[in-house]
Image (tube, rainbow, N blue to C red):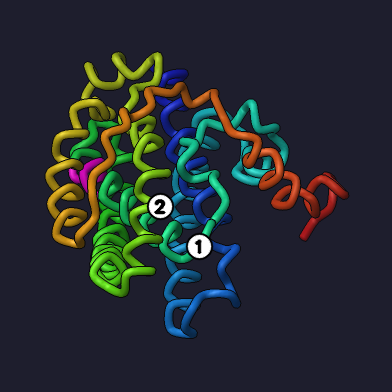
């Protein structure tokens, strides 16, 4: 069970870490100052959530969050591909965050009842943040989707690109069955319909068309080349002097 649990915790932590880094690319570059600060706060929240998971992993394995974040290669990361894609334009970033926040919302509704108490406790904290995130990106999705022809077009292009990648969020890990049976982690495949009940009506109300393209059922060992370049930047300082004390 512990190996399966660690695998799932790593996946959750890596999702938050990599998405935080991607959103951090917008600091100083967002379209309005207020949103520059808001997205920086969202990125900080995602990083804090990742830290909660890395702390749980350290308690189980002895590996610290710094070791896991800065001294693994891309093949060892277990984040979903959707979070490692480049930031794109503002529509792409907003929509990616919305789709991910809706996934987090249905996930944490289940995780607060996890039989693994450290995970249930962390989920209780994270769920409150994710409610804010979802409300924020819900508004932006409608604002852009119902905005000008250019804004709507950018949102539609972002949706067409992002939609297939969402399937990986709902693809179980190889050892999830043990965690599901023990009430530790939900069956993510069963969360898909609840996620669709949130996102599809809102996207359609925002005058966006749901793509016909099928969702990709990818393993979390599969990554795009974008992760390599992201890690090269993120890990540069730590790897320059692995024994430094900060």
Residues 106 and 118: in front is 106
Q: Position of residue 213 (x, y in %)?
A: 32, 32
Q: Residue furthest right?
A: 241
Lower sequence index among marks 2 and 1: 1
Q: How many marks?
A: 2
Main SS category, magenta section: helix
Tag 2 secondary structure: helix
Q: Is residue 229 above or below residue 4?
A: below
Residue at 56 percent of width and 68 percent of height: 26
Q: Position of residue 123 (x, y in %)?
A: 30, 47
Residue 119 appears left or right of 39: left
Residue at 20 percent of width and 42 percent of height: 195
The residue that label 1 is drawn on is: 89
Q: Is residue 221 above or below residue 21?
A: above
Residues 94 and 205: in front is 205
Q: Are the residues flagged by discs 2 and 1 in contact, CB closer than 8 Å?
A: yes
Residue 239 figure quarter:
top right
Q: Position of residue 8 (x, y in %)?
A: 42, 29
Q: Name the quarter where the C terminus is drawn.
A: bottom right
Q: Is residue 106 magenta?
A: yes
Residue 181 appears left or right of 10: left
Q: Is residue 68 magenta?
A: no
Residues 4 and 60: in front is 4
Residue at 39 percent of width and 21 percent of height: 173
Residue 117 figure quarter:
top left
The residue that label 2 is drawn on is: 158
Which contiguous range is marked in magenta?
A: 105-109
Tag 1 secondary structure: loop
Q: Name the quarter where the N terminus is drawn.
A: top left
Residue 119 appears left or right of 227: left
């Amino acid at each position: 069970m512990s190996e399966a649990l660690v695998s799932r915790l790593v996946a959750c932590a890596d999702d938050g870490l990599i998405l935080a880094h991607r959103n951090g690319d917008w600091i100083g570059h967002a379209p309005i100052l207020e949103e520059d600060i808001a997205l920086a706060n969202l990125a900080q929240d995602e990083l804090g959530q990742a830290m909660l998971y890395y702390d749980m992993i350290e308690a189980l394995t002895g590996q610290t969050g710094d070791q896991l974040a800065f001294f693994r290669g891309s093949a060892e990361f277990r984040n979903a591909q959707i979070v490692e894609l480049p930031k794109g334009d503002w529509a792409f970033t907003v929509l990616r965050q919305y789709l991910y926040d809706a996934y987090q919302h249905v996930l944490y509704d289940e995780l607060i009842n996890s039989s693994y108490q450290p995970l249930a406790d962390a989920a209780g904290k994270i769920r409150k943040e994710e409610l804010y995130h979802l409300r924020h990106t819900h508004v932006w999705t409608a604002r852009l989707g119902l905005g000008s022809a250019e804004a709507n077009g950018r949102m539609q292009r972002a949706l067409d690109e992002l939609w297939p990648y969402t399937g990986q969020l709902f693809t179980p890990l190889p050892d999830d069955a043990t965690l599901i049976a023990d009430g530790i982690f939900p069956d993510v495949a069963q969360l898909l319909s609840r996620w669709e009940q949130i996102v599809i009506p809102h996207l359609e109300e925002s005058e966006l068309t749901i793509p016909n393209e099928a969702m990709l059922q990818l393993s979390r060992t599969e990554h795009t080349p974008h992760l390599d370049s992201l890690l090269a930047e993120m890990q540069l300082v730590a790897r320059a002097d692995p024994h430094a004390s900060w």
